[in-house]
Image (cartoon, rainbow, N blue to C red):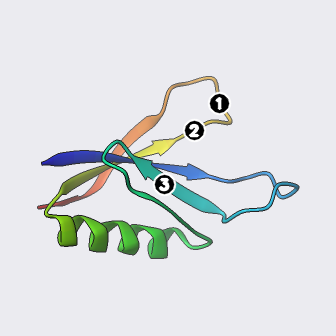
Amino acid sequence: MRDEVRIHLHSDPAVPGTRWWAESDSGFTGGSDELSELVSVILDWAEADGIEVSFALAMEDSLSESKHVEPVIHS
């Protein structure tokens, strides 16, 4: 199975929460203040569930749609 994980930057310091958070259609949700730690958690989840993942960096602060990047494909 292949799943896209959307990574978001939580950039409003007035609102509590982790700096980076992620979600996927197959049910992954998670967050971390360090992007590298979040990616590591995502890859651990994907490996445990046998899921191949791609990443999309969501750019909510702009008028454009999400920018899709695939730094890692895990199978």
- Front residue (pair 72, 5): 5
For the residue marked with disc 1, what is the amino acid?
Ser
For the residue marked with disc 3, what is the amino acid?
Ala
The residue tagged with tag 3: helix, strand or loop? strand
For the point 62% across and 36% down, which residue is it? 60
The residue tagged with tag 1: helix, strand or loop? loop
- Position of residue 54 relative to residue 19, above or below, is above
Q: Residue reaching furthest right?
A: 14
For the point 56% across and 73% down, which residue is it? 34
For the point 24% across and 54% down, which residue is it? 53
**Which residue lies under the disc numbered 1?**
62
For the residue marked with disc 2, what is the amino acid?
Met
Q: How far is disc 1 from disc 3 in space, using C-alphas? A: 18 Å
Drawn side of residue 33 relative to residue 22, left or right:
right
Q: Quadrant of the C terminus?
A: bottom left
Drawn side of residue 73 relative to residue 36, left or right:
left
Mark toward the viewer: 1 or 3: 3
- Position of residue 68 relative to residue 24, above or below, is above
Percent of width and height locating residue 72 = 25, 60
- Position of residue 73 relative to residue 39, above or below, is above
**Within 10 Å of the Cα at label 1, are there few (<14), some (14-19), or many (20+) other Cα atoms?**
few
For the point 45% across and 50% down, which residue is it? 23
**Which residue lies under the disc numbered 2?**
59
Q: How far is disc 2 from disc 1 in space, using C-alphas? A: 6 Å
**Which residue lies under the disc numbered 3?**
22
Which labelled disc corresponds to residue 45? Answer: none
**Within 10 Å of the Cα at label 3, are there few (<14), some (14-19), or many (20+) other Cα atoms?**
many
Mark 2 and mark 1 residues within 8 Å of each other at the beta carbon: yes
